[in-house]
Amino acid sequence: MRVLLLATPLIMLCISCSSAPSTPADELFLSRCSSCHGSELALKKKKTYDQWLDTIKRMENFGMEITGGERKAIARYLSEKQ
Ligand code: HEC
């Protein structure tokens, strides 16, 4: 228990330092897209905006919850990142 309490802030720090500077789009992407698989799975793929929209819709079939605005924001984020 004590180890967990100590480790949690360290893990949070590491997440924010590894991809600095962290933007709201980074946060949105990480919060939506790294629960079932790692975020690298998406970050290492090259897709266009429309292909990302399709991919995100597929993720919704797997049970992901996301609003229309967030879907577009993540598709734009990923297509511009590559
Ligand atoms: C509910 C669980 C879940 C969430 C949340 C999720 N995924 Fe996935 N994802 C999967 C599963 C399962 C697979 C493997 C099956 C497949 O590829 O169809 C996968 C595979 C992938 C792949 C590899 C296949 C491809 O199409 O290139 C990418 C990229 C991907 N996900 C991106 C994302 C992105 C971007 C998000 C956030 C918008 C996301 N995932 C959120 C379940 C999820």
Image: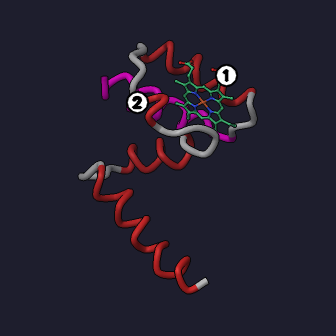
For this rendering, which residue is in front, 41 or 2?
2
Residue at 48 percent of width and 46 percent of height: 30
SS at mark 2? helix
Q: Gap in Å between the C-alphas at discs 1 and 2?
A: 17 Å
Q: Earlier in the sequence, mark 1 or mark 2?
A: 2
Q: Where does label 1 land, which residue?
A: 58
Question: Residue 78: image x %, image y %?
Answer: 40, 28
Q: Secondary structure at mark 1?
A: helix
Q: Where is residue 25? Give x, y as percent.
A: 39, 43
Residue at image position (38%, 57%) is 15
Q: Residue at x 41, y 13 (%)?
A: 48
Mark 2 lies within 8 Å of ligand 1 (Cβ measured) = no
The part of the image, by quadrant, that contains residue 77 is: top left
Predominant secondary structure, magenta span: helix
Residue numbers of the magenta segment: 65-82
**34 versus 18 height, above or below:** above
Location of residue 44 (image quadrant): top left
Which residue has dot 2 on it? 43
